[in-house]
Image: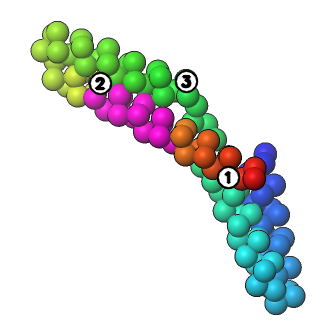
């Protein structure tokens, strides 16, 4: 919900900035729209998903090695990396939220 509010607020400020020929308002509007876009991009990435993917990946790798199934082992590597990427996104998400609340 906050994402839509920030985007709408940004559009309004940019329109007002254009109407009043105010670079300051246009800049604030662009910043609000960017905040909304960032909030929307990081929603849905949860710490639980990170742990699930990492664990699933490690299990697939172990089973793949034990059964000589290279494809399953490779899928495990991909799943584990996906979990690590989600972890990095969560770290950025936390930093962005902290920066937005200053």
Q: Which residues are magenta?
A: 77-89
At x 55%, y 28%, the residue is: 47
| Residues at marks 1 and 2, CA–CA distance in whole angstroms | 35 Å
User: Height in image: 52 above or below 36?
Assistant: above
Q: Which residue is mark 1?
A: 99
Q: Element type at marker 3?
A: helix
Q: Is residue 15 left or right of residue 35?
A: right
Q: Which residue is mark 2?
A: 76
Q: Element type at marker 2?
A: helix
Q: Which residue is mark 3?
A: 48
Mark with earlier residue (1, 2): 2
User: Height in image: 15 above or below 95?
Assistant: below
| Disc ID at residue 90 | none
| Residues at marks 3 and 1, CA–CA distance in whole angstroms | 23 Å
- Viewer-closest of 69 and 31: 31
Q: How did the renderer colour the structure? A: rainbow
| Residues at marks 3 and 2, CA–CA distance in whole angstroms | 17 Å
Closest to the camera, between mark 3 and mark 2, is: 3
Q: Is residue 69 left or right of residue 100?
A: left
Q: How many marks?
A: 3
Q: Quadrant of residue 14?
A: bottom right
In x, y percent, where is residue 13? 83, 73
In x, y percent, where is residue 80? 35, 28
State yes or no: residue 85 in magenta. Answer: yes
Q: Element type at marker 1?
A: helix
Mark with earlier residue (3, 1): 3
At x 82%, y 82%, the residue is: 17
User: Height in image: 1 above or below 53?
Assistant: below
Q: Residues within 10 Å of mark 3 (few under 14, many from 20)?
A: few
In x, y percent, where is residue 69? 16, 18
Farthest residue, direction bottom = 21
């Amino acid at each position: 919900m906050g994402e839509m509010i920030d985007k709408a607020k940004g559009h309004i400020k940019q329109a007002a900035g254009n109407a009043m020929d105010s670079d300051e308002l246009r800049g604030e509007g662009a910043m609000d729209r960017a905040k909304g876009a960032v909030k929307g991009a990081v929603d849905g990435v949860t710490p639980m998903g990170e742990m699930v993917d990492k664990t699933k990946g490690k299990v697939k790798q172990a089973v793949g090695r034990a059964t000589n199934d290279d494809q399953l082992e490779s899928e495990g590597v991909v799943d584990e990396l996906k979990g690590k990427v989600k972890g990095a996104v969560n770290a950025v998400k936390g930093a962005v939220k902290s920066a937005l609340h200053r």
